[in-house]
Amino acid sequence: MNLKAHLLEAFEVDTPELITLVGGGGKTTLMYALLREARARGLKAAAATTTKLFEPAPEDGVELCLIEGREDFPPCLECGPPPLFAAERIPGGKVSGLAPELIDEIYGTGDYDLIVVEGDGSRRMPLKAPGENEPVVPFMTSLFIAVVGLSALGNPLDEEHVFRPRLAAKAAGVKIGDTVTADIISALLNAPSGLSKGIPDYARGMVALNQCDTDEELSEAQSLAKNVLSPSSRWEGVAILKLKGDTPVKKVIHK
């Protein structure tokens, strides 16, 4: 068995683990994929969000669980779909996020081997820069993953292709409208105001380059990964992914 074909090995998940996902280009898809893999291995897993999130569909394989406080924590069941913890339903088919302190409390119960948290929004764009109050990261996060969609490459750095393009341009040291290149993505990942913003000092940092559909994109992603993993980088490794496929992990590169 090729262990690197599995997401838990790609990100070196060592349970118990609280994972926070940020960025764009497949955060929610990655969150649900990690849960399915964990449940298939008999692990007790749950999802949560600190931001607005579309209500899960039946095919996502999770059960929405709305909670207000500790008194609402449900029993952790050995079988059935894992829960997605959120605060309440809101207009637009979405749910609102929990306070990070409440997610820390859920994790602190010791009921779950793995909790995966979505820590910011991206309006379903492949690339983003964090806003002033983003990301919202639980204190007990042990693994912090920044997700980037490779479909951003070759497109203009503008409102149509990048969420918060002005902040992204400022963080990467480029101009609005410039063509998104591997160098721009690398700069955005490593900038203090970019996608490395919010990594807890004690957490491991990983990058997920998603939407790798072709051999050409794999080659470009590998070059990008090497640029991201500079000696001064906060990131420990890069997983190159194609989440919409039978083999989600294409390659993992470490420092």
Image (spheres, rainbow, N blue to C red):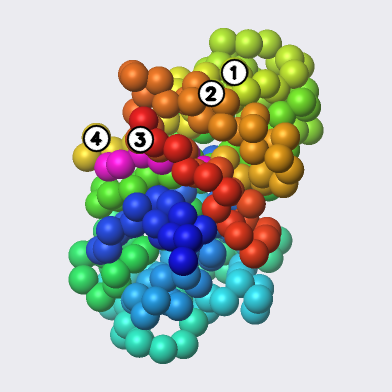
To which quarter of the image does residue 244 belong? bottom right
Residue at (36% x, 30% y) in the render: 255
How far apart marks 4 and 1 lie (CA) works out to 25 Å
Residue beneath label 2, please? 186
Q: Are marks 2 and 1 in contact (CB under 8 Å)?
A: yes
Question: Identity of the amino acid at label 3?
Answer: Glu
Query: Is 95 within the magenta?
Result: no
Of the residues shown, which amino acid type is indicated by label 4?
Asp
* C-alpha separation, residue under disc 3 versus residue under disc 1: 18 Å
Question: SS class of the residue under badge 3?
Answer: loop
| Residue 5: % across, % down | 51, 58
Distance between the alpha carbons at the discs numbered 2 and 4 = 20 Å
**Kind of residue at disc 2:** Ser
**Separation of marks 3 and 2 at Cα, in angstroms:** 14 Å
Residue 226 is situated, as x and y percent measured from the top left of the image, at: 49, 25
Residue for point 25% across, 52% down = 140
Q: Which residue is mark 1?
A: 183
